[in-house]
């Protein structure tokens, strides 16, 4: 299988998007845990979460060089929304009502619309 430059760029972009989404997800987890910590904003959990929030800026820099803000914004937002909803539901036992499920479906629909040329 031969990959052209565009295919390699898309593969690298997808990898960067996955890494920044993962860092955001772990950062959100740490901040959520910090909300129950005695020291709150001064807890190691919050500091870790804030640090992990800053790291994706490096990935955003590289993604913005070759993709529109609309495209990467939709892809990042949708993947983050879906994964955070799953994290909330499975780890923190948060409810998923019809509004949340509709929002998740619309986020996925936005990805489908944006991914077609």
Image (cartoon, rainbow, N blue to C red):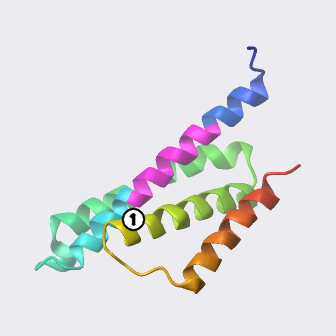
Q: Position of residue 29 (x, y in %)?
A: 32, 65
Q: In this view, does 40 lie to the left or right of 30?
A: left
Magenta stretch mostly in which secondary structure? helix
Q: Which residue lies furthest to the right in this view?
A: 117
Q: Could you tell me which residue is drawn at 66 percent across and 68 percent down?
A: 107
**Is the residue 12 above or below the residue 90 in the image?**
above
Task: Work out whether residue 95 or residue 50 is closer to the camera in this orientation and state it.
Answer: 95
Which range of residues does the magenta coloring cover?
13-25
Q: Which residue lies furthest to the left in this view?
A: 38
Task: Work out whether residue 100 or residue 48 is closer to the camera in this orientation and state it.
Answer: 100
- Residue 100 falls in image quadrant: bottom right
Q: Where is residue 59 in the image (x, y as percent from the top left)?
A: 53, 46
Task: Work out whether residue 70 or residue 64 is closer to the camera in this orientation and state it.
Answer: 70
Q: Where is residue 87 in the image (x, y as percent from the top left)?
A: 39, 65
Task: Work out whether residue 97 or residue 88 is closer to the camera in this orientation and state it.
Answer: 97
Q: Does the magenta stretch include residue 32?
A: no
Q: Could you tell me which residue is drawn at 74 percent across and 65 percent down?
A: 110
Secondary element at tag 1: helix
Q: Could you tell me which residue is drawn at 31 percent across and 66 percent down?
A: 91
Q: Quadrant of the N terminus?
A: top right
Can the viewer see residue 55? no
Dot 1 corresponds to which residue? 87
How packed mark 1 is, by other alpha carbons closer than 10 Å (few <14, some 14-19, many 20 or more), is some
**Is the residue 9 above or below the residue 23 in the image?**
above
Q: Is residue 19 magenta?
A: yes
**Is the residue 95 above or below the residue 115 in the image?**
below
Q: Position of residue 116 (x, y in %)?
A: 85, 51
Q: In this view, does 92 lie to the left or right of 34?
A: right
- Residue 74 falls in image quadrant: bottom right
Q: In this view, does 95 lie to the left or right of 42?
A: right
Can the viewer see residue 28? yes
């Amino acid at each position: 299988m031969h990959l052209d430059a565009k295919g390699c760029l898309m593969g690298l972009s997808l990898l960067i998007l996955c890494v920044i989404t993962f860092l955001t997800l772990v950062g959100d987890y740490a901040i959520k845990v910090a909300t129950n910590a005695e020291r709150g904003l001064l807890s190691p959990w919050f500091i870790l979460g804030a640090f992990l929030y800053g790291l994706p800026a490096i990935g955003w820099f590289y993604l913005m060089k070759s993709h529109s803000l609309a495209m990467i914004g939709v892809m990042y937002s949708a993947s983050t929304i879906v994964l955070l909803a799953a994290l909330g539901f499975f780890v923190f036992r948060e409810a998923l009502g019809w509004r949340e499920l509709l929002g998740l479906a619309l986020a996925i629909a936005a990805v489908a619309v944006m991914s077609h040329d």
